[in-house]
Amino acid sequence: MVSAYGALALMLVGCNGGTIVLTQQMEARRLVSSLHVDFAKANEAAHRAVMADTDEASVAAAHEAEQAATLALQHLSQLQPVLQSLGYGDEIKILDGFKGRFAEYRTLDAEILPLAVESTNLKAQRLSFNAGQEAADSFVAALARATTGVQGAADRAQLAWVAKVAILEIQVSQARHIAEADDAAMTRIEAKMAASNAAAHDAVTRLRSRLPGAAPAWAAVTTALDQFIDINRQIVELSRRNSNVRSLALTLGRKRVVVAAAEDQLHALEEALATHAFTATR
């Protein structure tokens, strides 16, 4: 027969044990909620890093993504032992599935975020629109000065037109190259650029041979053309790196699938924990 003191002791033990379980249940739900929020923040910030139109915005967003992912990892490591202490086998299996997706997510971001921050396609585009356009304008202006007031056959005007069109063709090809994701297609565009470059130089050389006596003016034409071609080389090198195109392709491809699967597992884990009701010991 249990004494009154023993009965009271058993009741206290039961109450304390129930309180511990309740506390663990609440902690598990809190950790899953925090994990879900941080995972969503990391994914959203990583997406902003990829879509940013300035280097500063991309760097800031990538930093936010890394911070949120680190917090998510901390909550993940804290949640595992809580579920184990509760003996929630089904929830642990769901969490293990999420851990696999989260590990893949972090592997993808380790590739995506540096590419996004590098932002070579945007840099190539800015170079094309700014310094590249200025160099093209300088060439056209220098060519006009070198041929101003020249009385001559139509073939000279034709050669000047060929040189200007060749530069324009290169500028058009720059835009296509920057947006292109396929290496073989970029190689074909570069071959067309090289042909246009050769046409421009050939036209300038032939014009210069037919219009002697204006060495300073033609030196300016040659210098402007060489500057434009050098800037085009830089644009091609940046575009070839394709960091914006590659980061976007990864984000919209495999990462999108991984994120969707991870989100489903987090929702399933939240729902599973919500089914556990604690009944206080009387």
Image (cartoon, grey):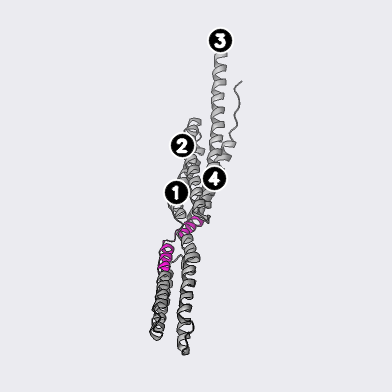
Mark carried by residue 87: none
Circle 4: residue type? Lys
Could you give the CA–CA distance between mark 2 and mark 3, rounded to whole angstroms? Answer: 42 Å
Element at badge 4?
Answer: helix
Q: Nearer the viewer, mark 3 or mark 4?
A: 4
Q: Visible in this render: residue 249?
A: yes
Q: Name the residue rendered at 49%, 35% in the picture.
A: 79
Q: Name the residue rendered at 43%, 65% in the picture.
A: 235
Circle 1: residue type? Glu
Q: Name the residue rendered at 53%, 42% in the picture.
A: 38
The residue where tag 3 is placed is 5
The residue where tag 1 is placed is 104
Toward the bottom, the furthest residue is: 153
Whichever of callouts 2 and 3 sits on the residue coming sooner in the sequence is 3
The quarter of the image holding the N terminus is: top right
The residue where tag 4 is placed is 41
Element at badge 3?
Answer: helix
Mark carried by residue 77: 2
Quadrant of the image occupied by residue 159 = bottom left
Q: Nearer the viewer, mark 4 or mark 2?
A: 4
Q: Position of residue 155 (x, y in %)?
A: 45, 88
Q: Nearer the viewer, residue 215 or 279?
A: 215
Mark 4, other Cα within 10 Å: few <14 / some 14–19 / many ≥20? some
* Magenta residue span: 230-252
Q: Is residue 66 magenta?
A: no
Could you give the CA–CA distance between mark 3 and mark 1, rounded to whole angstroms? Answer: 56 Å
Q: Main secondary structure of the magenta part?
A: helix
Would you say 174 lies left or right of 268 here? left
Q: Nearer the viewer, mark 2 or mark 3?
A: 2
Whichever of callouts 3 and 1 sits on the residue coming sooner in the sequence is 3
